[in-house]
């Protein structure tokens, strides 16, 4: 890797010579501006407003624009005499837990390499101290004409540094949150949890830039005179009418997708199940359960028939009992003659 800055890490009284290298690279496809009429390249030339002529890079310097619009020249000699200790030094100012750094502050990432054999021992000492403490180092450094804030941490066997925005550069999210007071039900949270568990985790190395791949395919087709790729069907958007139905459908779709990819939710014992919510109306267009209506109707008919039969049996038994009682009442009693004693 090519270094973009050479200096030293100031770790108390220990100075560690290092080289700074970019830890990331941009793979996005860039375009040039052209004249649509003839395909000619559009270029921007740096022109002096006073002389109205193009100025070569060797004659271009820096200037600060004052409030009244006047420009104050700032030379490299002026910048060289600034009382800035971090001009060639990454000055560690504190060691803090990584959780205390707001991800909103994260900026560009760099690798720090020991510059020379004498720097190897103190470099390794700082790396192992960071690893064992499970903390990160906050530091100040100067790059590209300004002092910056940085965070040093261990990545594999290398010390990496993330540029951080200053705290006053982070905007507060005023007016961003929804103004309407919305109540979220437990059932909705349960379905959201189920969806999160179903989607599970992913290997970051498996993710790729689909847009760039499609752009490369388009450019290849234009160069070779091939068939241009077809536009992908537009995904449904707009307002969600039934949040519960959308969550349930999302869980089912995620389960099917993971099952098709050989990564079913049941494989790791954490498969999510969708539990129907009682008392909720079915979403418009949602399929009914097979045979549900038929089974319900048949059950209702059987119950009604059973009730009718039971009622008839009860009435019949009551009538029989009444008839028997009447017959018993109308039948004359037999009188047995008494025997008279002999005189």
Image (cartoon, grey):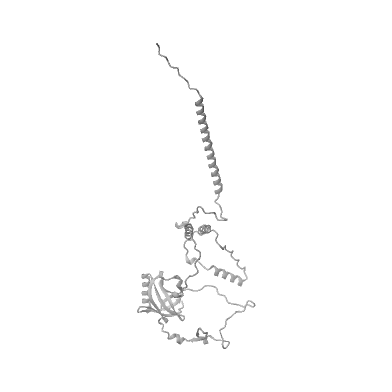
Q: Residue at x 50, y 26 (%)?
A: 329
From what the image shows, is residue 329 above or below residue 291?
above
Q: In this image, 270 relative to 288: left or right?
A: left
Q: Residue at x 54, y 49 (%)?
A: 292
> In the rendering, at what x and y percent does residue 310 appear?
52, 37
Q: In the current view of this chain or complex, which residue is farthest to the front? A: 343
**Quarter of the figure that contains the C terminus:** top left
Q: Is residue 222 visible?
A: yes
Q: In the current view of this chain or complex, which residue is farthest to the right? A: 37
Quadrant location of residue 106?
Answer: bottom left
Q: Who is closer to the viewer here, 11 or 194?
A: 194
Q: In the current view of this chain or complex, which residue is farthest to the left? A: 13
Q: In this image, 183 relative to 225: left or right?
A: left
How many callouts does the rendering have? 0
Q: Residue at x 36, y 72 (%)?
A: 129
> In the rendering, at what x and y percent does residue 267 appear?
46, 57
> In the rendering, at what x and y percent does residue 104 appear?
46, 71
Q: Residue at x 51, y 33 (%)?
A: 318
Quadrant location of residue 32?
Answer: bottom right
> In the rendering, at what x and y percent does residue 72 appear?
49, 86
From what the image shows, is residue 291 above or below residue 239?
above
Q: Is residue 264 visible?
A: no
Q: In the current view of this chain or complex, which residue is farthest to the top? A: 343
Q: Who is closer to the viewer here, 69 or 238?
A: 69
């Amino acid at each position: 890797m090519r270094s973009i800055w050479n200096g030293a890490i100031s770790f108390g009284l220990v100075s560690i010579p290092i080289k700074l290298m970019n830890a990331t690279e941009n793979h996005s496809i860039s375009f040039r501006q052209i004249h649509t009429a003839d395909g000619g390249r559009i270029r921007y030339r740096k022109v002096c407003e006073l002389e109205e002529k193009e100025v070569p890079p060797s004659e271009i310097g820096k200037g600060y624009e004052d409030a009244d619009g006047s420009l104050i020249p700032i030379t490299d000699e002026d910048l060289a005499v600034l009382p800035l200790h971090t001009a060639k030094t990454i000055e560690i100012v504190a060691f803090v837990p990584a959780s205390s750094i707001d991800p909103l502050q994260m900026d560009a990432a760099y690798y720090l390499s020991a510059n020379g054999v004498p720097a190897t021992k103190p470099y390794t000492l700082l790396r192992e101290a960071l690893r064992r403490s499970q903390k990160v180092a906050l530091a100040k450094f100067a790059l590209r004409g300004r002092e910056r804030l940085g965070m040093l941490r261990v990545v594999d066997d290398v010390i990496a540094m993330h540029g951080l925005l200053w705290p006053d550069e982070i905007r507060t999210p005023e007016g961003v949150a929804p103004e309407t007071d919305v109540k979220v039900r437990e059932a909705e949270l349960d379905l959201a949890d189920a969806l999160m568990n179903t989607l599970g985790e992913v290997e970051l190395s498996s993710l790729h830039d689909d847009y760039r791949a499609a752009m490369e395919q388009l450019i290849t087709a234009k160069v070779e005179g091939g068939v241009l790729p077809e536009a992908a069907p537009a995904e449904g958007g707009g307002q969600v009418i039934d949040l519960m139905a959308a969550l349930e459908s999302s869980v089912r779709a995620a389960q099917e997708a993971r099952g098709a990819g050989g990564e079913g939710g049941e494989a790791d014992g954490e498969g999510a199940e969708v539990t129907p919510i009682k008392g909720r109306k079915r979403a418009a267009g949602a399929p009914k359960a097979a045979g549900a209506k038929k089974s319900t109707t048949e059950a209702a008919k059987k119950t009604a028939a059973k009730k009718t039969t039971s009622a008839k049996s009860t009435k019949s038994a009551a009538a029989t009992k009444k008839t028997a009682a009447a017959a018993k009442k109308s039948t004359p009693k037999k009188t047995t003659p008494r025997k008279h004693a002999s005189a």
